[in-house]
Image (tube, coloured by chain):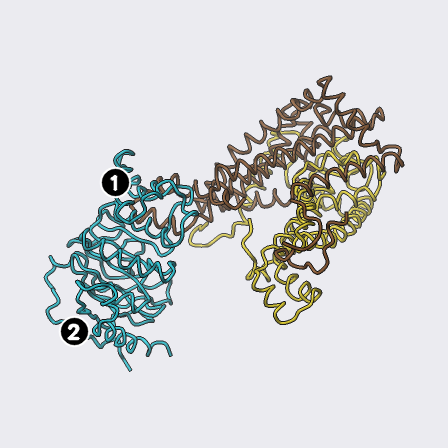
Chain colours: A cyan, B yellow, C brown
Amino acid sequence: MNKAIHMSLPDATTPTDPSANIVSVRGITKFYGSDVHALEDVNLDFPTGQMTTLLGPSGCGKTTLLKIIAGLLETTSGEVMVKGKAVTSPGPERAFVFQDFALLPWATVTRNVAFGLELTGVPLKEREAKAKSYIDKVGLSGFEDKYPHELSGGVRQRVGLARALAVDADVLLMDEPFSAVDEQNRRKFQEDLLHLLSVENKTVIFVTHSIEEAVYVSDQIVLLSPRPGRIHSIIRPELDRSSSPDDIRRDKVYLDTVEEIWGNIREYLD
Amino acid sequence: MKVAGYEIPPVFSLLIWIGLWEVAGRMDLAFILPPFSSVLGELTTLIVRHDFLAAAWQTFQAFAIGMFFAITGGIALGFIMGTNKTANSILGMWVNIFASAPLSSVVPVLMLLFGLGQLTVVVIVVLFSIWIIALDTYAGVHHTSNSLKEMGRSFGANKTQLLFKILFWAALPEILAGVRLGLIRAVKGIVIGQLLLSVVALGRMFRTFSDNFQFEEFWALTLILFVFALLFSTLIGRLESKVEYYAGTRD
Amino acid sequence: MTTTTSPGVVSAESSEGTAGLKLSGLQLRLISIVGFFLAWEISGHVPISPAFPTFSGTMMAMFEMIFDGSLFLAYFETLKPLLLGVGISAFFGVTIGVSMGLNKKSRWLWEPIFVVLQASPVAALIPLITYAYGIGITAKTVAVIILASPIIVLNTYKAVGNASPVLVQMSRAFQGTRMQEIWKVIIPNAAPVIFAGLRLGVAAGFIGVILAELLITPTGIGDIISYNRSIAKYPHMYAAVLSIIVFSAVMVGMLEKAEVKYFRPEKKRGQ
């Protein structure tokens, strides 16, 4: 059964105009060494101002794709376009949120949040003021002088998020940002993230292995199939975002989309 | 490092250093440093000399006996510290003090108490190596996951079974690391001890060579000790790598 | 001591709350120190050997040497080459270690030689030092350097070579340059292990300087030991040895405290 070539595009009106897509990837193929085939001919568009999720079972190359977009990994072939220009290294228009937070253990919350600005040479006063405003925005007021080891997983990831927001990039790349956060905090964090993004007007590319999380947060879900990673299908959940979080999680469209995706993924698990 | 497309193993960089030694020796940069080739030549005659073989055998005996006591004693000490909090707070302090103390200062005292012979050398071996073995064993026992111990107890293991079927194996990577470090320290200790004693075995040979300006012989003897020390620690390292896959993190 | 036996106690965590005399760790340590000195005093009175003075006699000798100033003078003589040697080893050792951690060619060149020096009894070379450097402070400093530098180099190399890949990637993702990556991420990340290496270097250097004083240059604290041994003033000799053990324990303890305080904020809470 060759599911990899099956492409379902539920919404035929998906924008294809290049100016509407802040990030595009064309023909990405990635080998690790000579025998591990991680990605095969991946073509994708990421619409400006929207949240796109890369979803798939382990081994489908979703984190590899995200790190290629970030410029942290090189492609074997194919290219990444950001705002119409091909990129091969990290740039100021993209900011990364790491799965295991990647906070400096010897630095306070303030210095960690300001670290991206510190690297680009923003003066101390200015970057601390900016860090402070984002610390407040992600709900960490009062934690400014704490060290990472004094914080829980959820709070640490809020620091990671504030650091990414502080550099004022247009695109936020998030690599399974909630996988090391416990379930209760994760839900709260998801809600806060959606709220924050509605204010900040960012394009987000989000990697997760949680189907519920993907459906709950995304405008567009890219389902990847494993070994080598290919695009299986693209799904756009039509959720009414104005209703309350609890209503969304009980919504029929939400539940049906989760089931549909699960149906697609389970065939790879045998 | 790659030269002309070939990967050269790091060990070969030693050849560069040996080459530098040879050149420095030939240029007479320092009179205490004869060329490597003449040291090597002296080495071949030295290892068949009767006084060397006797001294080496005597040293090895002291080393083996001392290591036996250090390993059994160190492991026992480590287990006592790892399984009993009271014992740990008493013994931990002493073990830590002696593990980092400049033990070369204790050698003259040992010479007074145990004489100028083999017994003192054995005591020196034990004193130099037992503490690090105890510390590493303790770390291994201490870091054994609680759930592993609780698993043992929930399946009805008694104290002896818990000790020999779970704790010992869980701590094995750390114990072997401790034994390897202990061996290295013991070799250093035996050299320090014999140099200070200066009347037994290799120590007397070192003394004779340096007093008579026989630098080729002196370096040859040093080289033999280096090779011996490396051989031993590599051997234990091999053993260690077999159980490394479940070693805890340690620094 | 009867307080150490509490039947049924196997694992460390279950010894909490057992019946019997409860003493804090500090109290236990103090008791064990007092016990040790008491045992020393008694065996000194037996006596187990004519060359084994009592604890009280040793302490008297220690006070005598403290008050006539000879002990301080000796320590001054011993610590000068120790600090100088450790300082030189630290400067070159950390430089070489960092370069090994960052650069493959440097690693290829230096790693084997320092592994050999670390595993081998380099103390054997100390008698040769006299011929090259005489019996002054230079000889002692060289003795410290050859014993202290391998451990400093290897610890630095290990710390820098094992730099957290996640943090390095983070620095790159936020457009850090290679220099920023090294100075703002890799070196601070390695600092605790580098410092621990310096601590081990001090301990190794201490062995070296004492050995040099006993073996080749009769000065400093080593001279007090060998001189008093030769004239059979054993209490003074034991007092010097005891003072070294205590001194090194205090010094290493202080370095450990400094390490936690300045380099490991995550460990502070756990204490």
- Residue C233's disc number: none
Q: What chain is tagged by disc 2?
A: A
Q: Which residue lies furthest to the top in this view?
A: C68
Q: How far apart are marks 2 and 1 (CA)?
A: 41 Å
- Closest to the observer: A260 or C190? A260
| Callouts 2 and 1 in the same chain | yes
Q: Where is residue A95 in the image (x, y as percent from the top left)?
A: 26, 50
Q: What chain is tagged by disc 1?
A: A
- The residue drawn where x is 34% and y is 67% is A37
Q: Position of residue B74 (x, y in %)?
A: 71, 51
Residue A219: quadrant of the picture: bottom left
Q: Nearer the viewer, mark 2 or mark 1?
A: 1
- Residue A10's disc number: 2
Q: Position of residue A159 (x, y in %)?
A: 33, 48
Q: Which of marks 2 and 1 is nearer the N terminus?
A: 2
- Closest to the observer: C234 or B228? C234
- Closest to the observer: C21 or B136? C21
Question: Is residue A126 visible in this depiction of the protein?
Answer: yes
- Residue A130's disc number: 1
Type of amino acid at the residue the image marks with label 1 = Lys
Residue B17 located left or right of residue A7: right
- The residue drawn where x is 65% and y is 27% is C139
Residue A63: quadrant of the picture: bottom left
Q: Position of residue B251 (x, y in %)?
A: 55, 48
